[in-house]
Image (cartoon, rainbow, N blue to C red):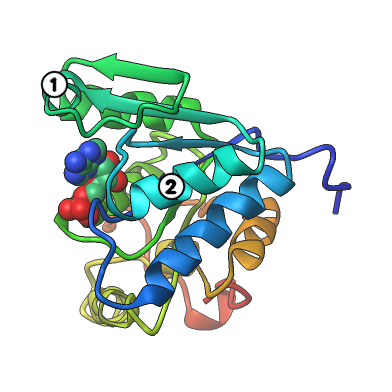
Amino acid sequence: MPPASTPVLARVCVFCGSSSGTDPRYAEAAAQMGSELARRGIGLVYGGGSVGLMGVVADAVLAAGGEVTGVIPGFLHRREVAHGGVDDLRVVGSMHDRKALMADLADAFVALPGGIGTFEELFEALTWTQLGVHDKPVALLDVGDFWAPVLALLDRAVDDGFLRRDVRASVIYATTPADVLEAFTRWQRPDVGKWIDLDPLPDASDTHTELL
Ligand code: AMP
């Protein structure tokens, strides 16, 4: 692995709740994610908000002297939920523009616990990996088994022939920010055709088992 001073990843996009959640461990994980990014010299790309876990991640990066790029649609900016301490705040026209710009700016994505907005961003990033729209890893940072139902659903989709096993295996799962960032550096994109029916589903023994 290269030394921490020469990151393979320039910027990582964090998806997470605009609420803080009921368990204090969520905010602790968000703060750890932010400080670990800054410690490794990796910039944060995120939704530009000051609220919930989003604000916690951004605050932690800024407190550790790291770089933060916020991407926020105008209507949220006008509602004054934008983070006032983020110098590089890009105000875009729509939620779609936001996701496109976040995906362009970042080299990898990690989802922390959150709600529908987080799920939507996570699944779009995974879809783009599946389709080869981008070659960027996507990770779940778990806290208290929050992501267990999503993992179970992905497994069900594999079992029932809706999701390729190698795409499923390409989803990084970890319980610490350091493990997420290290898994990003080892990640290899799944070699997939666009559609599930183009190739036979690979044998389970052929797929990468290290990450999931
Ligand atoms: P949710 O998980 O439903 O709280 O939504 C969080 C995700 O949606 C974040 O990753 C943001 O990109 C976006 N989002 C939702 N609410 C806000 C907000 N008030 N300010 C900025 N972004 C938000």
Q: Position of residue 4 (x, y in %)?
A: 82, 47
Circle 1 SS class = helix
Q: Residue beneath label 2, please?
A: 14
- Of the residues shown, which amino acid type is indicated by label 1? Arg
Judged left or right of residue 163, residue 44 is: right
Q: Nearer the viewer, mark 2 or mark 1?
A: 1
Q: Residues within 10 Å of mark 2 (few under 14, many from 20)?
A: many
Q: Quadrant of the N terminus?
A: bottom right
Q: Is residue 91 above or below residue 84?
A: above
Q: Nearer the viewer, residue 166 or 37?
A: 37
Q: Residue beneath label 1, please?
A: 78
Q: Is residue 171 visible?
A: no
Split into quadrants, the picture shows ligand 1 in the one at top left
Judged left or right of residue 196, residue 41 is: right
Circle 2 SS class = strand
Give me the residue at 47% from left, 19% from top: 87
Gap in Å between the C-alphas at discs 2 and 1?
22 Å
Asked if the beta carbon under badge 2 is closer than 8 A to the nearest atom of ligand 1, the reply is yes
Q: Earlier in the sequence, mark 2 or mark 1?
A: 2
